[in-house]
Amino acid sequence: MPRPKRYLPQEHSFHITLRCNSRQFLIAKRIRRDVLLVVLEKAKQKYPFRTYGVCLMANHIHLLLKPQDATQLPKLMHWVGWYASMLLNRISKRCGHFWEARYYATPIAPEDHQRALNTLRYIHANPKAAGVRKGFYDPYSNYGHYSRLEADGLSDWHPAFLQLAPTLTGCSKRYQNFCKKYRCKSKPIKIKQWGSKLIALLKGTATRAQGNSKRHRQCIGQQALPLNLPTLQQLPEQWQEIAQQFRSCNAPRWNDDDYSNSS
């Protein structure tokens, strides 16, 4: 059956979710998430969009985007997924599918400010919900862009955020208080079926055998990239500057309220 067409209304923002293949932790390392930040920066030059929310986790990413032309969203995400997977596969010396499936996209109407704020808070709460951080600040989440009112080079302020108060400082304070009220919802416990242990054992055996037989295997037919990334230990200087600006703006600092407070 053909895939159903996406609902792509104009002037809407979209909550994007993209997971790594088999939900593996393929972007846990810093250099790989730096690459994703660079890919987002380069994507803006091809398909203009506004970046409202960003959170890069170890095995998935969350984005809140508003394309200049909503009909270009599939092309935008196809390019992001393709270019990122090509780069990251070269860095990690792997081949095959990098992403689990096609991305999820949920449209948010421009007048629905409450839903936009709830989505933005959910995105920023991911590191805290996963137990990676005690608070909302994270080097690969743009919460700091909203709370500190600093430019990270990638992010824009969502119109719903700008409606919170007459001044930017007031908007920042209200959004921080709004985030403090967030409570992580516990995920339902999965009930194991009768053959789950056997299937897991067989999968583990097959994975180990496949890994031993295909070690150091080179991918055939990969398109040429501008950099020889398999031996690259450090990103080009211009790429480092993009990632460094984002991380320095959003990373936790010693004087943050939630740096020493787990509430």
Image (cartoon, helix red, strand yellow):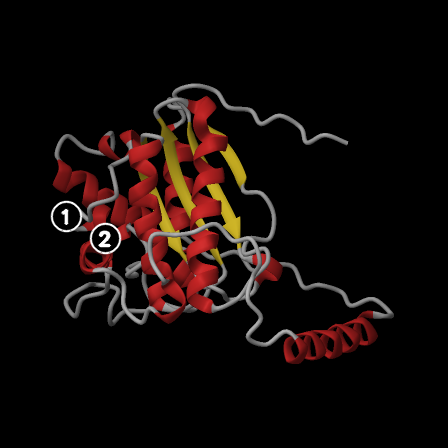
> SS class of the residue under badge 1?
loop
| Residue 87 placement, left or right of 179 | right
Instruction: Give the residue displayed 47% in from the left and 41% down from the top.
Output: 16
Question: Residue 8: horizontal and vertical position, in percent?
Answer: 50, 23
46 displayed left or right of 106: left
Q: Is residue 181 visible?
A: no
Q: Amino acid at mark 2?
A: Gly
Mark-to-mark CA distance, 1 and 2: 7 Å
Q: Are marks 1 and 2 in contact (CB under 8 Å)?
A: yes
The quadrant in which residue 141 appears is: bottom left
Q: Nearer the viewer, residue 49 or 55?
A: 49
Residue 184 - label: none
Q: In percent of the image, x 75 and y 72: which residue is there? A: 203
Residue 246's image quarter? Answer: bottom left
Q: Looking at the image, which residue is at 34% across and 24% down?
A: 68
Q: Residue furthest right?
A: 194
Which residue is tagged 2? 144
Of the pair 257 and 144, the residue shown nearer to us? 144
Residue 35 shown left or right of residue 153 in the figure: right
Crowd rating for badge 1 (residues with CA inside 10 Å; few <14, some 14–19, many 20+): some
130 and 202: which is toward the camera: 202
Q: Give the labeled residue for mark 1.
A: 150
Q: Amino acid at mark 1?
A: Glu
Q: Is residue 82 visible?
A: yes
Q: Position of residue 119 (x, y in %)?
A: 42, 41
Quarter the N terminus occupies:
top right
